[in-house]
Image: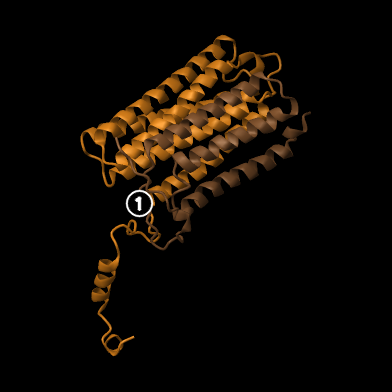
Amino acid sequence: MTTVDHTTRSDHDAPIGHGSPDDVHVHKPNSFYIKVAVALAIVTAVEVGLYYLSIGKLFLPALLILMVVKFVTVVSLFMHLRFDNRLFSWLFYSGLFLAVSVYLAALMTFRVFDGS
Amino acid sequence: MSEATLTESPAPDEHNAVVEHAAPATHGPPTSTGLSNNKLAMWLFLGSECLLFGGLISTYMLYRGRHTGTPGPAQLWDIPLTSVSSFVLLMSSLTMVLAVSAAQQRDDRLTIVWLSVTALLGSTFVGAQVYEFTSFYHEGVGFTTSLFSSSFFTLTGFHGIHVTVGIILLMSLVGIISRSEVPGDKAEVVELVGLYWHFVDIVWIVIFTLVYLIPA
């Protein structure tokens, strides 16, 4: 099957609410998505590898960074947020930001990160 | 501006006709934002779902050490099994994006194939989760055993329900595509279900790290 990459221009450049072409579908070749999936699988393998290795204080930040990398990759490339209208990014990331900030504040109130 | 335009302003209907004719057909749906309302609603829904799962994950983080006298995460977790099921769910995201790609190229046969594979991978994930829950139960950890178990089963159970709903959506989509009964833009309908499915995957990415890999 042949596929064509039509995503050379990002709709992030288009202003919101001015008829930006939302219905112009993102056509990345299937090989692109397969490469992304392989990269995600490798990152998952690294995460599991870190679980069994003893890397001391680096363990927690390394796992959190890898988690964020996987999260952003799926959202940006598989969910096409990187190529889509900016308003969609605002809707999703504002919900995510609100959730993270509210619950981090709540957990800090309960001293979850104090290690006690 | 010419004198003709100053003196002969077009009637409202005539003006609209000119504007509609001039607008290219590729300039998005006829909505006030120029964006699909369905897609807008889906992203809004997913944004709100972040708050739901954020609450569940936070509750688990708060209670994961509360299991005095009963098995805790260190005794229960089967990391190899959970790693494999995480990999399966991750690969289902790949098959889902391939289904979206096929739908955008109007290839119904391939769309159905990839949607079915995605549903199969999702079912494998749910099967692994049911196996995990059953083994925990046999080890004496039920929903009300401890605060840890309650928060764990609530969090992963909610996620499992979301995956199950996703599988139902996928199979329904396979059915209506087979019968050519998809309302509206077929590619957009597949994309909307895809967005939901990928969201379920990203939630598991967070759960896998925070719940399973990072010790209490």
* Residue B176 image point, x, y percent: 25, 35
Seen from the viewer's position, the closer of residues A12 and B146 is A12
Above or below, A90 against B6 in this view is above
Above or below, B116 against B76 in this view is below
Residue shown at the point (36%, 30%) measured from the top left: B168
Q: Give the drawing colour for chain A.
A: brown
Q: Is residue B184 visible?
A: yes
* Residue B52 image point, x, y percent: 54, 38
Letter of the chain that mark 1 sits on in the rendering:
A
Residue shown at the point (29%, 90%) measured from the top left: B3
Could you tell whether B87 is left or right of B75 in the image? Answer: left
Seen from the viewer's position, the closer of residues A100 and A4 is A4
Q: Give the drawing colour for chain B.
A: orange
Q: Tag 1: residue type?
A: Val
Which residue corresponds to mark 1? Answer: A24
Could you tell whether B38 is left or right of B107 in the image? Answer: right
Q: Is residue B154 visible?
A: no
* Residue B41 image point, x, y percent: 42, 48
Quarter of the image where the C terminus of chain A is located = top right
